[in-house]
Image: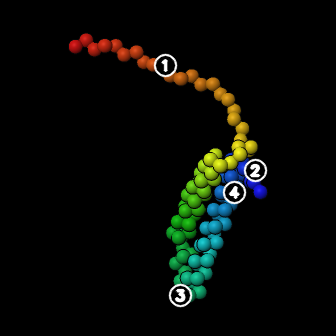
Amino acid sequence: MEFSGTPKKYLRFAIISSVVFNFYLYLGLAAVLFWHNGATWLFSWKPLLVTVVFTIVFARVNYRWMMRLDAQYGTGRGWTLESRRLKLPERAIRRPDKN
C-alpha cells in the first residue's frame, strides 16, 4: 500500500510522530527513575525544556527525511509543479583598469 503523501500530510505526520515518540520516551524514563530511585529531578523545567527542544528538532529532521525519500523514491502524485517567471541578473560589464 502506498502513502499518497503531500507536504502538508508529511509535516503533520512528522510533528505527531515526534511528539508521541518523545512523550513515550520521556514518560518511560521518568517512570523508571521514579520507581527505581524515587528521583523527581526529571520533572523540573530544565529536562522538560530539553525534551521540547529535542522534539522540535526531531520533527524538523523527520520531515526533511520524509520529503527527501518521497522525492527520491515516490511517485510524485501528491505534488504540483507551478511555473513562475523570474528575471536573471544581467552580467556586469567590467571596465579595464587604467594602470
| Sequence-first tag of 1 and 4 | 4
Query: Pointers 3 and 4 in contact (CB under 8 A)?
Result: no
* Amino acid type of the residue that numbered disc 3 sits on in the rendered structure: Asn
Q: Earlier in the sequence, mark 3 or mark 4?
A: 4
Residue linked to disc 2: 4
- Residue in view at x 61 percent, y 67 percent: 22
Type of residue at label 1?
Answer: Glu
Furthest-top residue in this view: 98
**Discs 3, 2 touching: Cβ within 8 Å:** no
Q: Amino acid at mark 4?
A: Phe
For the point 55% across and 82% down, the residue is 33
Image quadrant in which the N terminus is located: bottom right
Residue 95 position within the rendered picture, expressed as x and y whole percent measured from the top left: 34, 13
**What is the C-alpha distance between the residues marked 4 and 2?**
12 Å
Image quadrant for the C terminus?
Answer: top left
Of label 3 and label 1, which has the lower sequence position? 3
Question: Residue 29 occupies which quadrant of the picture?
Answer: bottom right
Circle 4 residue: 13
Q: Is residue 16 left or right of residue 89?
A: right
Seen at 53% across and 23% down, the residue is 88
Query: Which of the pair 17/70 is nearer the observer?
Result: 70
- Name which of mark 3 and mark 2 comes first in the sequence: 2
- The 10 Å Cα crowd at callout 4, few under 14, some 14 to 19, many 20 or more, is some
In the depicted structure, whether residue 35 falls above or below residue 49: below
